[in-house]
Amino acid sequence: MAGIKLPPAEDATPVTAAATAAELQPRTPATGDLISDDDRSIAADSWSIKSEYGSTLDDEQRHADATEDLAHVNLRPSSDYSSDKDSYKGEEEEDGDAVASMLGLQSYWDSAYSEELENFRQHGHAGEIWFGPEVMDTVASWTKGLCIDISKRRMLNTVSGDKSGQNDHEVHDLSDWSVLDLGTGNGLLLQEIAKHGFSDLTGVDYSEGAVNLARGLAERDGFTNLTFLVDDVLDTKLERQFQLVMDKGTLDAIGLHPDGPIKRLMYWDSVAKLVAPGGLLVITSCNSTKDELMREVERFNQRYASAPVNQSEESSDQDASTFPTCFQYVDHVRSYPTFMFGGVVGSRVATVAFLRN
């Protein structure tokens, strides 16, 4: 699943995604089936960044437009929509609503990746770079450092704090970390992660076109150790757990579905099963701040703690707060540049890591 190419930015004082909105609105079709080929082309002109096959817009304007499009999203009632793969069924809607319905539907991404796959086959183009190359590089290098720190702490705990027992080579060896990239898109993030020493690497996407594109790029670029599978995180068929699960724009896209709030609940239920105990979940979002993601995790933790599967019959009358939480905040990227809006400092992108208890 593709993300949005945005300029790197930093998490500081929380600022909601809506606060970044300006007066510009994305162009979308006024009537008809919003997921027809012509309509996709119109909408794509207003927000999608085709970085490798040209546009009349310069990069700065594309960055601004992408942020504004996401910030203007207002989801309609689910009764106005059909399933992920079906068309939008409502009457003429406001621009923000129309874009929301498209970016949240699998049919949109199937079409988008069909075009990108054809461009790759004909011209060798890799397609969009999620949130821009700077953010991708930052996420990969920052995640590597975080994993090394965690490995170091675990090793020190194993030897009861005796630093003499620490093998620096083992600490920096990340080959044993199993990695899952949710909504992998063209797989470029997974390629970048591979460059930092990770070797057990799996990317999944619910769009078959995305998976085929990722496989083609990995083969072309010499990354023979990457595995790409067609899988929907909301109905995953994966039967293993991973020590590092990465999400770069997937939660954003899920939230843009007409049934976004419900699907985000499904997302957390599924991800909790995919991250191994003691493993890391790293989420990069341009539609939620660090604090918003932390609050969402806290709400999931409350549901998780009170779920019957986590409680014995003898302790069912206990307060849910006494049960262990599922995810806890570890760290976030602090190096993204910030911007000022309405007297509040915030950032366009947030990358936050949570530890699976």
Image (spheres, rainbow, N blue to C red):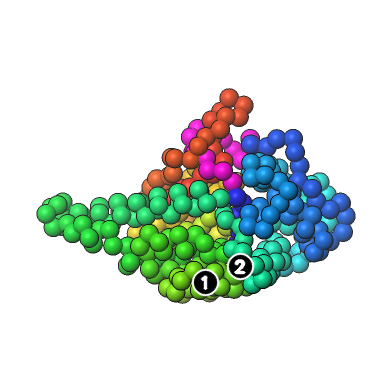
Residue 45 image label: none
Question: Is 4 left or right of 147, judged from the image as shown?
Answer: right
Question: Hey, what amino acid is under mark 2?
Answer: Gly
Question: Hey, what amino acid is under mark 1?
Answer: Arg
Question: What residue do we see at 11% from left, 54% from top?
Answer: 164
Circles 1 and 2 in contact, beta carbons < 8 Å: yes
Q: Main secondary structure of the magenta part?
A: loop
Q: Where is residue 221 in the image (x, y as percent from the top left)?
A: 49, 69
Q: Position of residue 59 (x, y in %)?
A: 64, 45
Which quarter shows the N terminus? bottom right
Q: Name the residue under label 2.
A: 124
Q: How many marks?
A: 2
Who is closer to the viewer here, 316 or 90? 90
Q: Position of residue 288 (x, y in %)?
A: 57, 45
Disc 2 is placed on an element classified as: loop
Who is closer to the viewer here, 187 or 55? 55
Question: Is 85 left or right of 269, judged from the image as shown?
Answer: right
Cα distance in 3D space between marks 1 and 2 = 9 Å
Disc 1 is placed on an element classified as: helix
Question: What residue do we see at 53% from left, 64% from top?
Answer: 187
Q: Position of residue 43 (x, y in %)?
A: 76, 53
**Vertical order, 83 against 18 (above or below):** below
The furthest residue to the top: 343
Who is closer to the viewer here, 247 or 129? 129
Magenta residues span 6-19
In magenta segment, residue 80: no
Residue 220 image label: 1
Who is closer to the viewer here, 329 or 107? 107
**Vertical order, 33 against 202 (above or below):** above
